[in-house]
Image (cartoon, rainbow, N blue to C red):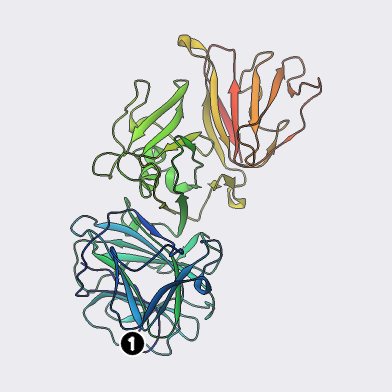
Amino acid sequence: MKLRMAFGVAGVFGVLALVAMSVQAATSLPYAQGFESGFAMGDPWTTNGGGTSASSAAAVLTGAGTQGLLLSNDTATLDIINSSYTNTWIQVYARPVVGSSDPAVSGVSGAFYLTSGGGLRAYTGAWVTVASGLATTGYKGFIVHADYANDTWDLYYTEGPYKTNMTLANTTGPLLFTSMAGTIDNVSVASGDAAHVDAVAVSPGKTSAGESGDKVGVYEHPSTSTAQADFTLPVYASRYTSPAGAKSVSGALGNDILSGLVTGDRLYVWTTNDAFSYYDVNASGALFAPAQSPTAPAVGSMFIYSNTRMMLDPTNSPRRQTFGFYAYSNATVYALNGQIQPSAAGATEAFTLNGTSGGRTGYTALNWPDADTIASCDIKDPDADLSNNDRLFVSAPATPNAFTEYWWNNTAGLWYGFNGQPASASIQAGSKMWVHRQGASDEGVTVTH
């Protein structure tokens, strides 16, 4: 199965197509390409040679580097190792050339294009309008979730800035392939008139297209050789809370994290065992392996909350850039890039603060999801069962390794600064925190967003 994406008018249009194409070298997934100055056509990319396809500063998408792909009367194709990926997320940002009428389509598994009236039209054997009111100029973001097991696909779009969350276009149900397919083989972008393309990313998916939700958040895993870099939960939503195991490492939330990772990547999660436990992406890149470290809870019982502290240790050094795709329901979004959303007002979460029983040290690592103050945050009595001189350490996102220390005044029932006064400082959304309790027992704390 070959997946082709293109943009344009009068026979040059956005299309998921069966195409006869042969290129010498294919890429594994996940894959990302920004068409920067070092980019040149060649394996795993090829063109049909009919026009122009070149990296150009004039084609850049703001926020996605300094260069984009200028494409005119040509087709650029990314070849992917076939017979391997049956569920994929495909992201493309482009300035499409609009079409004035439905193009003729044959031998394709699906298609979409932008009309001159701002309609987004999809082809599943017949043309249907899946969104309207789009601007006919400027960059657009598109994500296709292609589910080859069920021969369906979902189409998302945005007109916002780079990495803005995308909205599902086909709200009445998944779109059908027009012919049965097994796996993805390539992604192509084509245009007759001059078009600009940038930020192509393809990642394996772990959730079927029919379960995608009505929004997609995109999380970027930058190229880095830094081990154990902090990883902020991109999306936390109602989709991850039902059933109860959905928010576990092996549940819906863990599966979405997997969409941007590669075999050998390691996810560290702070646990009630008073330590970071780690989980590895297995040899097939499809699942987190069973608990690897001696203290790690089983994957099905390791729950991730919006304030759970996590770190990501990439296997590659340096690691190539990849993207993770997080499908979620627009209802009750708790945290997005570490920040609580307005729709989550009044939402509550229960988590555990560690004690010192069993020889543990009583430390709990947190990533505070919403803007707050030291005085009003939910780490306080009676729930936290704090003792005099327990400690709270807080760092701002801009200076993650510089912590301010506070101590608990049991008489006043307040956190104090070392100036001897009650603490009144702000906590920024996404701040790293540590709590050090002297009490022996673990304590459950409810956080109200």
* Of residues 237 and 99, the one drawn nearer to the viewer in this rendering: 99
Q: Residue at x 60, y 23 (%)?
A: 435
- Looking at the picture, which amino acid does disc 1 mark? Gly
The C terminus: image quadrant: top right
Q: Position of residue 413 (x, y in %)?
A: 73, 20
Q: Quadrant of residue 52?
A: bottom left
Name the residue tied to disc 1: 11
Q: Quadrant of residue 268?
A: top left
Residue 362 shown left or right of residue 71 in the figure: right
Q: Position of residue 241 (x, y in %)?
A: 44, 42
Total numbered labels = 1
The N terminus: image quadrant: bottom left
Q: Residue at x 50, y 73 (%)?
A: 59
From what the image shows, is residue 288 above or below residue 385?
below
Q: Position of residue 378 (x, y in %)?
A: 64, 31
Q: Position of residue 46 (x, y in %)?
A: 29, 70
Residue 408 shown left or right of residue 37 in the figure: right
From what the image shows, is residue 144 above or below residue 285?
below
Residue 70 shown left or right of residue 428 in the figure: left
Instruction: Classify mark 1: residues with Cα within 10 Å, few (<14), some (14-19) or many (20+).
Output: some
Q: Residue at x 48, y 37 (%)?
A: 229
Q: Quadrant of residue 436?
A: top right
* SS state under label 1: loop
